[in-house]
Amino acid sequence: MAKIVDTLVTDEQVSASPMREPLLLTTPERLKFRDKVYTSRLLIVPGTDRTLPVNKGVVEVPVSDIDAVKLLKANEEFEPLKE
């Protein structure tokens, strides 16, 4: 069984410790597609219960969402937006 050790950090230890760089939170890379037909609609990803909202003629998906990227690239009603 693991032993649990209680430790107390004093103010002196905190002030003596070197400053650390703040962690940078990164957002996953995303792809944007322009909807050439509608400015607002809800797309359903085939074979799943997931939906993709189109707002102001744009739909945005993570690069890692392979099913959504395939759907948007295969459909003539969408074109990739260049950033």
Image: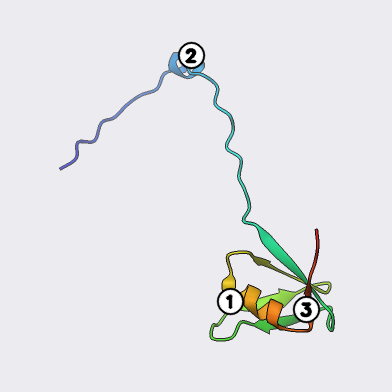
Query: Amino acid type of disc 3?
Result: Phe
What's the CA distance linking mark 2 and mark 1?
51 Å
What's the CA distance linking mark 1 and mark 3?
15 Å
Q: Quadrant of the N terminus?
A: top left
The crowd level at tag 3 (other Cα within 10 Å; few <14, some 14-19, many 20+) is many
Q: Residue at x 45, y 13 (%)?
A: 12
Query: Amino acid type of disc 1?
Result: Asp
Q: In which quarter of the view is residue 19 placed?
A: top right
Q: Secondary structure at mark 3?
A: strand
Q: Residue at x 65, y 73 (%)?
A: 69
In the rendered image, the vertical position of residue 25 relative to residue 67, given as above or below: above
N-terminal label among 1 and 3? 1
Q: Secondary structure at mark 2?
A: helix
The crowd level at tag 2 (other Cα within 10 Å; few <14, some 14-19, many 20+) is few
Q: In which quarter of the view is residue 42 placed?
A: bottom right
Q: Which of 7/83 is in front?
A: 83
